[in-house]
Image (cartoon, rainbow, N blue to C red):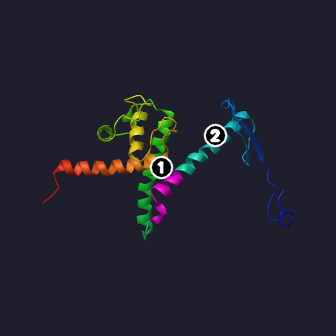
Amino acid sequence: MPPIGKQNRYPALDLTVIHVSQRGAPKGRKPIEWKLITDLPVRGRSEAIEKINWYAMRWKIEMFHKILKSGCRAEDSKLRTAERLANLMAVFCILSWRVLWLTMLNRTAPDASPKMALTDTEIALLIELISDVGNRRRRPGTLAFYLTKLARLGGYLARAADPPPGNVVIWRGLSRLTDIELGAEIGAAGNLGN
């Protein structure tokens, strides 16, 4: 029920509490438990799982916005028209999506082909720029192998106990790789010098 002073303006709200408990928690850790409160109808187990899956996507949305704000520094833009800002945000959204996608793909499909996410030029540059030392945990030729090289270009140390590369080092690595690729294209075109 709404507070007493506001009951005339706000109707009563029916809420459902979904209690979630982790199955198969890692050894030595308590299972994760949380409660999701929703005003959406939950008439059975399948609808409860649906709402949990929706809420689980929130983390990815938060990560996308973090990349957009911190990586692209979208809030630092000095553009003065809505049209220019909309165009800039469209480009930033594509970049943010790619960084998040590469990070998630590295965790969900590490043995996939690198061509699934990287161009032939990007793969060739990573082979030339980053040695295979420090990349022993990844099988050569896999997506994870090349994304670890990309992350190392962004400052990832790739130590044995390090977690998989995150968005920040993927972002930095991709930014540096893009600059290097542009320089290589300019150099190959012969447009340098006088």
Q: Answer above or below: position of 97 versus 48.
A: below
Q: Which mark is residue 132?
A: none
Q: Answer above or below: position of 99 versus 110.
A: below
Q: Answer above or below: position of 127 versus 180.
A: above
Q: Main secondary structure of the magenta part?
A: helix
Left or right, residue 154 beside residue 5: left
Return the residue nearer the eye: 33 or 134: 134
- Dot 2 amino acid type: Asn
Q: Which residue is mark 1?
A: 168
Left or right, residue 24 beside residue 68: right
Residue 173: x %, y % from top left: 39, 47
Q: Is residue 72 magenta?
A: yes
* Element under disc 1: helix
Q: Earlier in the sequence, mark 2 or mark 1?
A: 2
Could you say which quadrant of the image residue 137 lies in? top left
Q: Which residue is mark 2?
A: 53
**Disc 2 to disc 1, how far (Cα)?**
25 Å
Q: Quadrant of the C terminus?
A: bottom left
Left or right, residue 38 beside residue 6: left
> Which residues, given as a range, are shown in magenta?
64-76
Give the residue at the far bottom of this rendering.
Answer: 80
